[in-house]
Amino acid sequence: MLNTLLLMSLLLFVYTLYSGWLERTPMTGAILFTLFGFLTGPTFLGVLSAHGDMELLKLLAELTLALVLFSDAASANVNVLERYRSLPIRLLLIGLPLTVLLGGLVGYLLFPNLGWVGIGLMAVLLAPTDAALGKAVIVSPRVPHRVRESLNVESGLNDGICVPAMLFLLMLNPQDPGGELLGQFGVLFVEELGIGLVAGCGLAALASVMIQASRKRDLVAETWHRLTLPALAFSCYALAQLLGGSGFIASFAGGLLYGILDRRREEHALLPTETIGNGLAMYTWVTYGCMIVGHAWDAFSWQVLVYALCSLSIVRILPVLICLIGTPLRFKERLFIGWFGPRGLASVVFGMQIYFSEHVHDQELLLTFSATVTLSVFLHGLSANPLVKRLYGKSAAESRSPVASSPSP
């Protein structure tokens, strides 16, 4: 335990010293932390143990995702989002279902023995995107607001939308699913989204009133005020989960509403939330590299690798190109949005759900999840800065970031 604490602390210490330089290179924090966990795990050096508490890893991944969703939503440029709202709506209501369907088709061709429940889980598991892995795209002033906000909102909501589908598939018997539960899917979908929206927005609205009242009376201490928004983000997530809704929808909706209501918010107000999220992300990616990538390293098959590459390319890009037909975006920008659909913390959280279910015996399912997320960490991380410079390098003044934001690992 102490050796793990020492290694993790030293890694974080060294990364903070060179973080500014690293952010200007293709090497992201997620890449370095995953590599560190993999190399120090049982596959190579054996310093870190793979026999950790998977429940703890799952909880940390969920809390990290909740913080990232809240902070990204709270820092969104609402005026730009209102102007270009049709873009994320198209990505969520047309692109996401097409991505799941195409992912299921590719899964059926490569894993015919997995069964339709397992294939459905694979498609849903790898459909959500994670803006944090392509943070250079989200915060870069070179990228137009409409592209940044569309990717931000899409990644903030698509994981919550996929939660009901994943829970529904987990309820089915893999051997004899039958049709008796099909009628429950609509109810489950409405409950997850509805309760998540009500819980997140209700708590954020109440919190905004309390925060403003505290400011007026000068009741808050500056040191404790830094923990206000992280506590609110966790509260939105936990309340929605307790009520039977989606904690991720609640976190994103709560952050978005709070950003709208708190018009006096300083530019640095969200930095503590992002800082805590960065620390949790570091631990999540190290343990992911050690416990999941290390475990699956020598078991990948060609079918698994082909599906992973298809999931990161045609399964994502083709639906995006289709759903963005008729928009003012240039074809290069549509390809750009299609490529930057990285699989990250949301897929890790979903993978943990499947790990603890009766589908744990579906080795191909877990291997495909591991291969896709790992490839995404490297491919999207390494390509973010170079592609932004290639596509938008000559138009750096085209837009300016509405909120100063420190990139996330």
Image (tube, grey):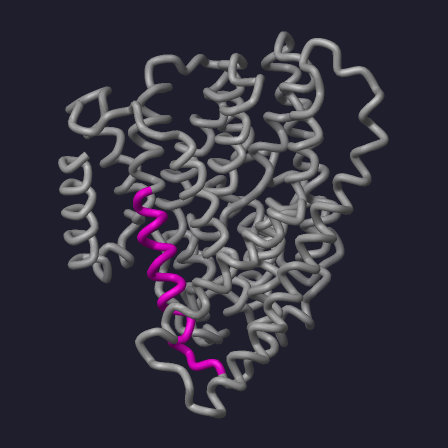
Query: Does residue 269 sit above or below 409 in this rendering?
Result: below
Closer-to-camera residue (344/144) = 344
Front-lying residue, 288 or 332: 288
When the figure is inspected, residue 165 is found, relative to residue 42, above or below; the finding is: below
Asked if the stretch drawn in magenta spans residue 313, the answer is no
List x then y, in percent, for residue 320: 65, 45
* Front-most of residues 246 and 296: 246
Residue 93 x/y as whole percent: 74, 48
For the point 68% across and 30% down, the residue is 102
Circle count: 0
The answer to which of 291 and 94 lies nearer the viewer is 291
- x 33%, y 80%: residue: 222
Q: Main secondary structure of the magenta part?
A: helix
Give the quarter of the figure containing the N terminus: top left
**Vertical placement of 50 versus 312: above or below?**
above
Residue 278 is inside the magenta segment: yes
| Quarter of the rendering containing residue 276 | bottom left
Relative vertical location of residue 369 with respect to residue 256 in this rendering, above or below: above
Q: Position of residue 238 (x, y in %)?
A: 55, 52
Residue placed furthest toward the bottom: 217
Residue 135, quarter of picture: bottom left
* Magenta-colored span: 265-283
Question: In the image, what residue occupies the spot 53% across and 51% down?
Answer: 336
Q: Is residue 380 left or right of residue 264?
A: left
**Which residue appears at 32% of the width and 32% of the height?**
289
